[in-house]
Image (cartoon, rainbow, N blue to C red):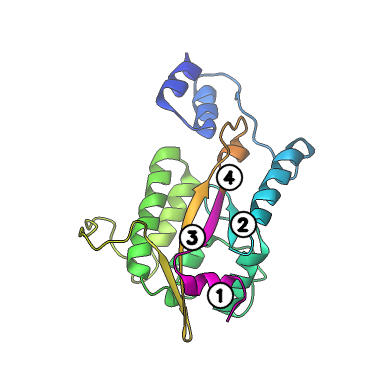
Amino acid sequence: MVLRLCAALDVPLRQQNALLLAAGFAPAWRESDLAAPELAKINAALDFMLAQQEPYPAFVVDRRWNLLRANSGAVRLVEFLLGAVPASPVNLADALVSPDALRPLIVNWDEVALYFLRGVQADAIADGTAETAALLRRLLAYPGVPPLSPAVPLGDGRAPVLTMDFRQGERLLRVFTTIATLGTPQDVTLQEIRIECFFPADEETVRHFRGER
């Protein structure tokens, strides 16, 4: 009955395990290390997706935006924007919202941050874990973060997708992103993986990623 209710309500696997434990049952879904041998084919698929995205950037992140891997296009983008790739583990949510990382380089940061923070808020509500709630609190505590309540302005002149506009020196890079997930995960780790791919939104950005000047 617990599993039937979870299926009907589309409850994530992690929360299904928590509900089973609360009802006195063992967890039904495993949570594997991504490096586990039984996930070799999944890792190969992730690497294939990252390689196919070249020369455009792509990242693999977990549920809380911790960077798991990136392709060469992503490394080149970070090196162009920040001068070097950080040596310590990277959380892309912090990198986007913190005033000490990518934020000063994003021309339309207020708009991008609003959409992103609302996404993290939706994650925190959906998974109900202390870790995701803590991530949201940490992001909202950064100075200058926009409130989540304002309505998004409407108008006929809006672009079909929200772009992220990076400015480094005289160069302006405009990108939009897609986020993919595994379609039929039966493992908590795999359900929480996201593959974010960046695409150029104008010809100048296309030339930059392709190394054309």
| Disc number for residue 193 | 4
In the displayed structure, does residue 83 sit left or right of residue 127? right
Residue 208 is labelled as: 1
- Dot placed on the residue nearer the N-terminal end, 2 or 4: 2
Nearer mark to the viewer, of 2 and 3: 2
Residue 72 percent coordinates (x, y): 67, 65
Give the residue displayed 47% in from the left and 16% down from the top.
Answer: 4
Q: What's the distance in space between the residues labelled 2 and 3, CA to CA?
A: 21 Å
Quarter-of-image position of residue 113: bottom left
Q: What's the distance in space between the residues labelled 2 and 1, CA to CA?
A: 15 Å
Q: Which mark is residue 53?
A: 2
The answer to which of marks 2 and 1 sits earlier in the sequence is: 2
Disc on the earlier residue, 1 or 4: 4
* Residue under numbered circle 3: 93
The residue under label 2 is which amino acid type? Gln
Q: Amino acid at mark 1?
A: His
Secondary structure of the residue carrying numbered label 3? helix
What secondary structure is marked by label 2? helix
Q: Amino acid at mark 3?
A: Ala
State the CA–CA distance, disc 1 to disc 3: 25 Å
Crowding at dot 3, Cα within 10 Å, few <14 / some 14-19 / many 20+, comes out as many
Amino acid type, callout 4: Ile
Looking at the picture, how far across and down is residue 177, in whole percent?
Answer: 47, 57
What is the C-alpha distance between the residues marked 4 and 3?
15 Å
